[in-house]
Image (spheres, grey):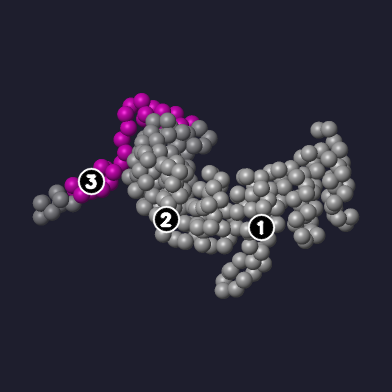
Amino acid sequence: MKKIILIIFILFIVLFTGCKPSFDQATTQELEQCKSEIDIGTCYARLGIEKSNEDICLIIENKYAREGCLRKVGIAKADTSICDKIKEDPDEKESCYKEIAVNTNNMAICEEISKIQSLCYQQFAIKNNDVTICDNVEEQYGRDQCYSYVAKEFLDPEICPQIELEDWKNQCWRYMAEGLKDESYCEKVKLEVFIEGKMVPSGARLHCYYFTARAKNDYTICHKMTKDSSYKDTCYYDVAIAVKDPSICDYMRDESANKDGCYYFASSEE
């Protein structure tokens, strides 16, 4: 009977006393000073990050401050086991993993990520100038997203045709048009996309023309936005103000609420 009581006592010590973090005297004094702060959790978090001490993070009551502290300490120490202590916010946990993967150049860590896995591989693809790294992303949407952003980074139009999903392919062509300041790429943007089993109209080409017009500050690209709409008016408005040419405002519809403002701001010296 005495032996059983002794075992229970030892287990109690291990489970409750042994798990409590202990700090050196200097840290303990600093923690005591935090208790005089209005926001104790912020003070603890600042101290935990400064000392790269995850045990300090763990005593923070506010879960957002606690897990943000753990993420920063985990990244600083390049220790994914600290990321695993993030229990409440999966986004913080995955961000912790991703940053460690990139900082340590360990692409294998990307496999432990689900929600932002494409972003993890994307950063390696850009770092190594190798779009085929995106093929490690299992899910089609994330894989095409990775391809699109790598194309944007290197302004490589040869990548766009390799994208399967029309939404991301359209986005890729828009990045090419805007980045290379060549509106001819907008012609490759589909007017319709396949969504939920049917083809539906897409405004992607209008967006492409708008962003390219802004990139080039060329109002004639706005002409290609075939629909007479407020979005087309916005194209003229923004270019007119950017180049300080009020004559461009003449192309806006008379009923446009911003036409008078276009003349005013495009004529302004400021």
Q: Nearer the viewer, mark 3 or mark 1?
A: 1
Describe the element under mark 1 as helix, strand or loop. Answer: helix
Return the disc, 3 or 1, that comes first in the chain's sequence: 3
- Foreground tag (2 vs 3): 2
- Which residue lies at the image location 44% right of the left edge and 61% below the top edge? 139
Specify the amino acid type for callout 1. Glu
- Is residue 82 visible in the rendered image? The answer is no
Residue 29, label in figure: none
User: 16 or 140: nearer the eye?
Assistant: 140
Pick the quarter of the image with the N terminus: bottom left
Secondary structure, mark 3, is helix
In the rendered image, the residue lying farthest to the top is 26
Residue 135 got which mark?
Answer: 2
- Residue 27 on the magenta span: yes
Label 3 belongs to which residue?
Answer: 14
Q: In this figure, what is the number of numbered marks?
A: 3
The part of the chain drawn in magenta is 9-36
- Asked whether, in this view, residue 46 is left or right of residue 221, the answer is left
Q: Which mark is residue 187?
A: 1
Q: Residue at x 75, y 55 (%)?
A: 224
The image position of residue 125, as x and y in percent, is: 44, 46
